Image (cartoon, rainbow, N blue to C red):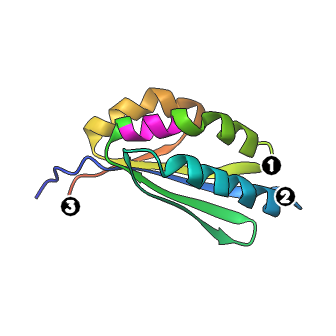
Amino acid sequence: MATNDTCCTIVPYFKVHEGKLDEFKAFCERFVEMTEREPGCLYYGFSFDGDQVHCREGYVNAQGALAHLDNVGALLEQTLQIADITRLEIHGPAEEIEQLREPLAPFSPQYFTLEYGFRR
C-alpha cells in the first residue's frame, strides 16, 4: 500500500535562551497570526516543555511549506537570536521532499520519506 498524500511537515525543536521565554512566546503569537492566512497550511502550533519548544506544522505539499518559509523568514531570523534549533525534521513523500532539499539545506534537516499511509 503506497500513499498519494502530498502533505509535508516541518518538525523543528527549539531551545530558548535563558530568560527569553516570554519574548519567544510573543514571537509565537506573531508566527501564528502570519501563518493562519496561508492557504497551504493544514495546521500550525507551538508546544512547550519549559525552555524546549516544538512547532507542529503541516502543509498540503512542498509549495505550501516553501510559501510558509517565505512568509515568516524575517521573523524566523529574529527568533533565532533568542533560541537555537536543536533538531529539524522534514517529513513527506519523496517527490515533495526533493523540492525542499535545496531551500532547507542551510538548516541541515533530517529527511523522512513517507511511503505508506493516508490523509483524510
Residue that badge 1 annotates: 82
Magenta stretch: give its range: 64-69
For residue 9, side relative to residue 13 (left or right): left
The residue depicted at 66 percent of the width and 34 percent of the height is 74
Residue 73 lies within the magenta run: no
Q: Is residue 65 magenta?
A: yes
Residue 37 at what x, y percent from top left?
A: 46, 47
Locate residue 20 relative to residue 90 in the image: left or right: right
Seen from the viewer's position, the closer of residues 10 and 46 is: 46
Q: Which residue is at the far bottom?
A: 49
**Mark-to-mark CA distance, 2 and 1:** 6 Å
Q: Give the residue pinned by disc 2.
A: 20
Find out whether the residues at labels 2 and 1 contact each other: C-beta distance under 8 Å: yes
Corner quadrant of residue 95: top left
Q: Residue most toward the right?
A: 19
x, y (%) of residue 86?
A: 66, 52
Nearer to us of marks 3 and 1 is 1
Q: Residue type at mark 2?
A: Lys
Q: Are marks 3 and 1 in contact (CB under 8 Å)?
A: no
- Secondary structure beneath disc 2? loop
Residue beneath disc 3: 117
- Please tell me which residue is depicted at 61% across the width and 50% down the height of the picture: 31
Q: CA distance from mark 3 to mark 1?
A: 37 Å
